[in-house]
Amino acid sequence: MDSEKREGDWERKVLERLASEGLAEQRRRRRWGIFFKLLGFAYLTGIIYLLGGWGESADPLADGKGYTALVSIQGVIDSGGESSAEQVIASLQDAFADAAVRGVVLRVNSPGGSPVQAGMINDEVARLRSTRPDLKVVAVVEDVCASGGYYVAVAADSIYVDKASLVGSIGVLMDSFGFVGTMDKLGVERRLLSAGESKGFLDPFSPQRPDHLSHARGLLDDIHKQFIEVVRKGRGDRLKEVPEMFSGLVWTGARSVELGLADGFGTVDSVARTVFQAEEVRDFTHKRNFAERFAQRFGADVAENMMGALGRFNLR
């Protein structure tokens, strides 16, 4: 009997130990499960906080949390590039729509481009400034702000440069090639069929006609006058005109300040700090993704091939 009792006690103790360890394991699993659930919840809450802007003041300007908006114009201004009117205007509109923005810096590093694209940006800057008179736009020039780039910059309230920046080039050009002599040497005959006396205007494979040349000069003069008018309107009494000012020459940043083409020296950071008193700079510049760039470039290439070597107007 004693041996049977001892054997029963031993089996009971083993079962009790196994049951106890099983319960302990279940408790550990529950604790770890709760821990990872809380960790996941905290991670998700953090993401929502960052994306949704929780915790921000309803009026960030009221408690000094405003910032400077940055919109960049980089490279040639044309419809197929990153600095197209479409891209720049969308960036500016986003900046003006943000109540926390204390000022807009238009960073310009461009040799120019299409007078149409530059004109569209200039007009939109003027329109946006009228919607929020309290919000100033300052153009900051880096290496170069020439021709179409300057056409855009004069829409700003003020222009800041580096002393070695290149500024100006207030002129218009139209460039193409003439292949008539080459074709004669090669014995190639040009066969151009057109309906309309001047449909072959400035065709590079045909002899240049005096009436076409005169018409082209008239077009250049008209666009040049528009450019000069925009500069005079944008700079006002600050402009100190000299005979060469609208000749297409470029000036150093230091000389541009003397001529009233610019207002002073500064960078994006110094303007944010001293002009807007909002040191934090947020980039509002729109950038196309790869698919958009490919589609836009493909369309531009097709259009360019269709145009051939016919001259185009450029603020460059």
Image (tube, helix red, strand yellow):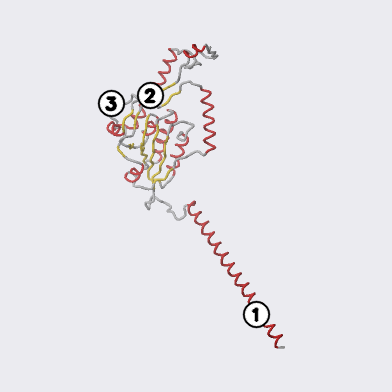
Work out whether 288 lies above or below 24. above
Height in image: 281 above or below 311?
below
Helix, strand or loop for disc 3:
loop
- Indicate the amino acid at tag 1: Lys
185 or 204, which is in the foreground? 185
Q: Image point 43% across, 21% down: which residue?
A: 175
Q: Which numbered disc, 1 or 3, marks the residue that appears first in the sequence?
A: 1
Q: Quadrant of the N terminus?
A: bottom right
Q: Earlier in the sequence, mark 2 or mark 1?
A: 1
Task: Please tell me which residue is depicted at 54% across the width and 62% down the height of the picture.
Answer: 38
Q: Quadrant of the C terminus?
A: top left
Q: Nearer the viewer, residue 290 or 94?
A: 290
Crowd around label 1: few <14 · some 14–19 · many ≥20 (10 Å) = few
Q: Nearer the viewer, residue 310 or 29?
A: 29
Name the residue tied to disc 1. Answer: 13
Q: Nearer the viewer, mark 2 or mark 1?
A: 1
| Residue 80: percent from left, percent from top | 49, 32
Q: Is 157 situated left or right of 307 in this image? A: left
Which residue does the image show at 37% across and 30% down from the upper left?
A: 146
Farthest residue, direction bottom: 1
Separation of marks 3 and 2 at Cα, in angstroms: 16 Å
- Counting the numbered discs, the total is 3
Q: Which residue is mark 3?
A: 242
The Cα atoms of the two marked residues, 1 and 3, are separated by: 107 Å
Residue 263 image offset from top left, x and y in percent:
30, 36
Q: Looking at numbered disc 3 in the image, what kind of residue is underneath it? A: Val
Discs 1, 3 touching: Cβ within 8 Å: no
Mark 2, residue position: 224
